[in-house]
Amino acid sequence: MEFNQFVERIAALLRVEIPTPINPYDSLYDDLGLDSVQALELMIVVEALAESLVPPMQMPELYTLADAFEYYRRLRATEPAES
């Protein structure tokens, strides 16, 4: 999944509006207006999109859309290969 597709899915699932053009370094809190509950939902949504069955050892710090996308990519990279 590419970055823009990722952001569109996040926006739809969280029911938030992402300004266009999309800036990967927009603050989730200041620029996009997420609150702490939505930030937690964001992590859950990212994990679901990544189809991750392994919870992170610690909660990642997500401040921007780029942080959320990088978290998604890390989760996808750590998935065990299917037999």
Image (cartoon, rainbow, N blue to C red):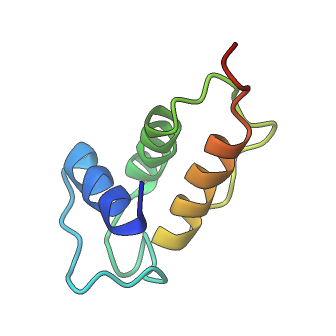
Side of 31 relative to 67 (left or right): left
Residue that lies at the very extreme toward the top in this rendered image: 83
In terms of depth relative to the viewer, which is nearer, 4 or 81?
Answer: 81
Q: Which residue appears at 33% of the width and 62% of the height?
A: 7
Q: Is residue 64 visible?
A: no
Please tell me how many numbered marks the rendered image carries: 0
Location of residue 12 with respect to 23 vertically, above or below: above
Question: Where is residue 17 shown, x and y percent of the image?
Answer: 18, 66
Residue that lies at the very extreme toward the right in this rendered image: 57
Location of residue 28 with respect to 15 vertically, above or below: below
Question: Where is residue 58 shown, x and y percent of the image?
Answer: 78, 42
Question: Where is residue 73 shown, x and y percent of the image?
Answer: 60, 53
Question: Where is residue 37 shown, x and y percent of the image?
Answer: 41, 46
In terms of depth relative to the viewer, which is nearer, 44 or 1?
Answer: 1
Q: Which residue appears at 46% of the width and 32% of the height?
A: 48
Q: Which residue appears at 61% of the width and 62% of the height?
A: 70
In terms of depth relative to the viewer, which is nearer, 1 or 64?
Answer: 1
Q: Which residue appears at 20% of the width and 50% of the height?
A: 12
Location of residue 49 with respect to 69 vertically, above or below: above
Side of 36 relative to 6 (left or right): right
Q: Is residue 44 visible?
A: yes
Side of 24 relative to 81 (left or right): left
In the rendered image, which quarter contains the C terminus?
Answer: top right
